[in-house]
Image (cartoon, grey):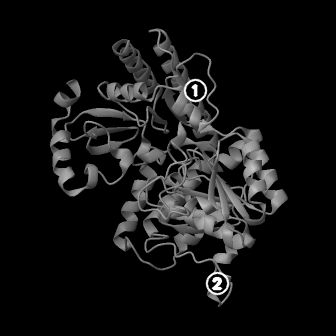
């Protein structure tokens, strides 16, 4: 009742949207029942909706705004750049300079190819792995979301043995196979079963769409050893973890260097972007100079808006900030996120609610295990050992207290203050009383 009273304009907009947009949205994650909040403006770590309500924003632009909404340095540069052209469709100096920064900062990056989205980046990374090895089978984690490209639309949501969508080709699981996160034995079994046709492994260092389960360092190291032994390609999907866990992403944070990685989101601080980076001998297969015979090179179109000048300019500034201010940015984010996770658990515990605020670095998600002391080491654990309905209830009730979450969690940006953390913990305490 309180929600519908406070969000009348959002409700009216949703009724209009349903007539022209499937489900009233352009991305399923933006839908929430009974209807989503419609945003009007954003600033720093907050946004204001169509009804004038202010929210602390932990969705953070799909986790792509580690510097917050509208970073002043980037806004200033874009204002100067727009009159010179918003889309050129030609190579430009900004593209070269951003690529040089990526290769300087990201451990695996010897070359980089820009595209327009994380979905495209993972599609191209898998294609490169198959082209480089001459083999077809790709292994991915259960619960791993790598965008909506066909090759990787397997075992994203439970039940993992069911087709992920209508419209997918029926033989997709012939060449894309899923394993439980943090289970090296399961990976080795799949490798053995497909040894003659094993092209590579793609993994998110933190499986955010599967309940925020972080890969154990020894698991990632095991994947690195397996791919080296077999000559397969190890791909880190760093669309979310890239530049968020550290300037060099999850590979820097965990100290394990893959052969390829995909990036997006924080790469250009809120501007549209995708990228594949990695070993020179693999990346050069995408070069138009590699071969004049089309089946001797890897086709990577990149998209009409690849290396868009505005995205490239934003990316140069963002990466320079991550690199030059890393000692200011990352320790503060880690400290505030740790305090937030602890405060949420304690506020829930004070009301007798068993809650777990899971996450690493600036990432967090609030889950409600059925039993105390449970360890959630795989994505299936999240869906079978926690109350997902209570997770949704928590998220919805936090909205009424001015806190915007997705899947009951989100991430911090540099514009989230200690006062914001205090306010969020206080809101959690009120919500806990409502949930008892």
Local SS, label 1: helix
Say what secondary structure mark 2 lies in: helix
Q: How many marks?
A: 2
Q: 250 or 382: nearer the eye?
A: 382
Viewer-nearest of discs 1 and 2: 2
Q: Residues within 10 Å of mark 2 (few under 14, many from 20)?
A: few
Instruction: Work out which quarter of the rendered image holds the C terminus and state it.
Output: top left
Rendering quarter of residue 97:
bottom right
Report the residue marked by disc 2: 295
In the rendered structure, find residue 338 and report the number of the disc placed on it. Answer: 1
Q: Position of residue 297 (x, y in %)?
A: 65, 81
Mark 1 surroundings within 10 Å by alpha-carbon count, few (fewer than 14), some (14 through 19), many (20 or more): some
> 14 or 148, which lies in front?
148
- Position above or below: 236 against 297: above
- State whether residue 300 is above or below residue 424: below
Give the CA distance from mark 1 to mark 2: 50 Å
Q: Nearer the viewer, residue 183 or 71?
A: 183
Which residue is rendered at x = 50% and y = 12% of the image? Answer: 349
Q: Earlier in the sequence, mark 1 or mark 2?
A: 2
Instruction: State the image coordinates of residue 56 (x, y, percent, origin top left).
Output: 37, 33
Q: Above or below — where is 288 with respect to 57? A: below
Residue 202 lies left or right of residue 51; in this view the side is right
């Amino acid at each position: 009742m309180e929600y519908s009273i406070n969000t009348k304009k959002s409700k009216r907009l949703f009724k209009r949207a349903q007539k022209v947009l499937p489900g009233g949205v352009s991305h399923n994650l933006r839908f929430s029942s009974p209807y989503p909040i419609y945003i009007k403006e954003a600033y720093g770590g907050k946004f204001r909706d169509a009804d004038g309500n202010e929210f602390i924003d932990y969705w953070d632009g799909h986790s792509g705004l580690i510097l917050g909404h509208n970073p002043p340095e980037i806004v200033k540069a874009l204002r100067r750049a727009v009159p010179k052209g918003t889309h050129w469709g030609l190579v430009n100096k900004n593209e070269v300079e951003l690529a040089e920064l990526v290769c300087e900062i990201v451990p695996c990056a010897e070359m980089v190819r820009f595209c327009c989205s994380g979905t495209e980046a993972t599609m191209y990374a898998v294609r490169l792995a198959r082209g480089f090895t001459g083999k077809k089978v790709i292994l991915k984690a259960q619960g791993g979301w790598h965008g909506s490209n066909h090759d990787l639309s397997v075992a994203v949501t439970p039940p993992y043995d069911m087709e992920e969508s209508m419209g997918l080709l029926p033989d997709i699981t012939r060449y894309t196979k899923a394993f439980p996160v943090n289970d090296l034995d399961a990976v080795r079994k799949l490798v053995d079963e497909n040894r003659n046709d094993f092209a590579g492994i793609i993994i998110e260092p933190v499986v955010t769409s599967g309940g925020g389960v972080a890969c154990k360092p020894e698991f990632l190291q095991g994947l690195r050893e397996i791919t080296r032994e077999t000559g397969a390609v190890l791909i880190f999907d760093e669309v979310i973890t890239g530049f968020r866990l550290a300037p060099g992403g999850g590979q820097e944070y965990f100290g394990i260097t893959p052969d390829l990685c995909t990036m997006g989101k924080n790469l250009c601080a809120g501007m549209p972007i995708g990228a594949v980076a990695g070993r020179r001998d693999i990346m050069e297969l995408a070069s138009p100079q590699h071969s004049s015979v089309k089946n001797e090179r890897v086709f990577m179109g990149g998209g009409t808006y690849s290396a868009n000048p505005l995205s490239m300019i934003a990316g140069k500034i963002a990466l320079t900030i991550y690199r030059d201010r890393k000692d200011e940015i990352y320790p503060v984010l880690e400290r505030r996120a740790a305090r937030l996770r602890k405060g949420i658990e304690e506020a829930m515990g004070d009301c007798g609610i068993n809650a777990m605020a899971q996450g690493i670095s600036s990432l967090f998600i609030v889950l409600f295990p059925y039993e105390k002391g449970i360890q959630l080491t795989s994505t299936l654990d999240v869906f079978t050992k926690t109350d997902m309905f209570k997770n949704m209830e928590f998220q919805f009730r936090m909205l009424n207290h001015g806190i915007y979450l997705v899947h009951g969690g989100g991430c911090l940006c540099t514009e989230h203050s200690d006062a914001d953390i205090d306010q969020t913990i206080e809101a959690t305490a009120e919500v806990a009383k409502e949930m008892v």
